[in-house]
């Protein structure tokens, strides 16, 4: 079996730490470089349920997309929930490695996996990485549908293809507008509206869309917006990343057993649907 240091070197080649945003916290959080690795688990969030799953699975390495300590810390005491995750992993000899915005910018990366889940053909990055002479790396992706379809059908496809969450997929814009060019960005994407418009996209699928940016974007022009759960837009990357590590393992003869967590760690647990907003007058609202 390979040592942890060898597996981490392979992961760093896929997602070099220097390509992460300056504010990000990527890389190895805990783990003995000399320890042997036979089983690896991929997940989006390094929360307690995932740490427990890694232990139950017998994983030697847990790879997550989201960092455990994004802004640093002064304690890993088990009385804190993040400290308890660290204690759980170390006590059970499970290493933790994080690939976040370096995986977002990769080719292929998080948004490629999101596009693939919806059968979208990737044309290029939404925000190209200036350090990539080939012009394939960067944030988000500009994609095309094989056949144009109404925005509501694209939303339905996203709801069917992405992992189920309490939120589902929200839609802003004309549901009947026909779209072919679609921008996608796994995770929070409402800082990318200028790039979406510059790319000529007719629709944008992302997560964590806020009221004011959405309101301004829809007033700016006929852009259709699809807002899915943050976790759901990033989970497809876990399958892509696991497949990449599988290929590396086969090439080196490592015999790694690579798994993807199906545990839903989206924090929203239920959804109460409103009535049709077009047929509802709220108390106190103007008629």
Image: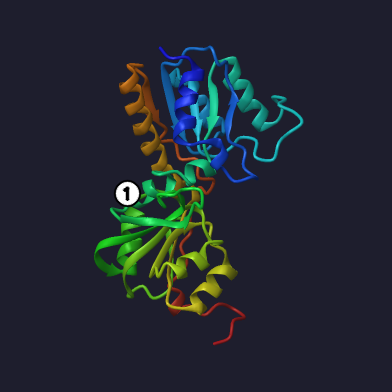
State the residue in front, 46 or 237.
237
**Residue that appears at 50% across and 34% down:** 64
Tell me the SS state at disc 1: helix
Q: Which quadrant would residue 18 be assigned to in this image? A: top right
State the residue in front, 176 or 138.
138
State the residue in front, 87 or 144.
144
Q: Which quadrant would residue 76 be assigned to in this image? A: top right
Image quadrant occupied by the N terminus: top left
For this orientation, the residue located farthest to the left is 147
Percent of width and height locating residue 249: 35, 22
Q: Is residue 126 among the parts visible in the rendering? A: yes
Percent of width and height locating residue 218: 49, 75
Q: In this picture, is 222 found above or below 105?
A: below
**Residue that appears at 46% across and 66% down:** 196
Q: How is the image coloured?
A: rainbow
Image quadrant occupied by the C terminus: bottom right
**Residue that appears at 34% across and 66% down:** 181
**Residue that appears at 64% across and 45% down:** 22
Q: Is residue 117 left or right of residue 62?
A: left
For this orientation, the residue located farthest to the bottom is 287
State the residue in front, 80 or 187.
187
Q: In this picture, is 249 found above or below 200?
A: above
Q: Is residue 84 left or right of residue 119?
A: right
What residue sits right under mark 1 in the picture? Answer: 116
């Amino acid at each position: 079996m390979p040592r942890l240091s060898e597996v981490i070197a392979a992961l760093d080649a896929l997602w070099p730490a220097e390509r992460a945003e300056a504010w990000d916290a990527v890389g190895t959080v805990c783990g003995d470089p000399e320890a042997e690795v036979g089983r690896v688990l991929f997940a989006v969030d390094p929360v307690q349920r995932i740490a427990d799953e890694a232990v139950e699975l017998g994983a030697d390495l847990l790879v997550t997309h989201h960092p455990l300590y994004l802004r640093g810390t002064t304690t890993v005491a088990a009385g804190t929930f993040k400290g308890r995750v660290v204690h759980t992993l170390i006590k059970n000899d499970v290493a933790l490695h994080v690939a976040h915005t370096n995986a977002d910018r990769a080719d292929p990366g998080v948004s490629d996996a999101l596009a693939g889940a919806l059968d979208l053909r990737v044309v290029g990055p939404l925000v190209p990485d200036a350090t990539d002479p080939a012009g394939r790396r960067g944030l988000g992706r500009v994609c095309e549908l094989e056949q144009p379809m109404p925005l509501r059908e694209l939303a339905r496809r996203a709801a069917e293809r992405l992992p189920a969450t309490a939120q589902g997929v929200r839609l802003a814009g004309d549901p009947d507008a026909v779209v072919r060019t679609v921008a996608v960005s796994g995770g929070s994407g409402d800082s990318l509206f200028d790039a979406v418009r510059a790319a000529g996209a007719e629709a944008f699928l992302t997560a964590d869309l806020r009221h004011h940016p959405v309101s301004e974007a829809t007033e700016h022009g006929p852009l259709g917006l699809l807002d899915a759960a943050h976790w759901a837009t990033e989970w497809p990357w876990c399958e892509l990343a696991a497949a990449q590590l599988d290929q590396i393992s086969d090439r080196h003869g490592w015999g790694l057993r690579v798994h993807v967590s199906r545990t839903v760690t989206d924090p929203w647990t239920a959804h109460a649907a409103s009535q049709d907003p077009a047929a509802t007058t709220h108390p106190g609202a103007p008629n």
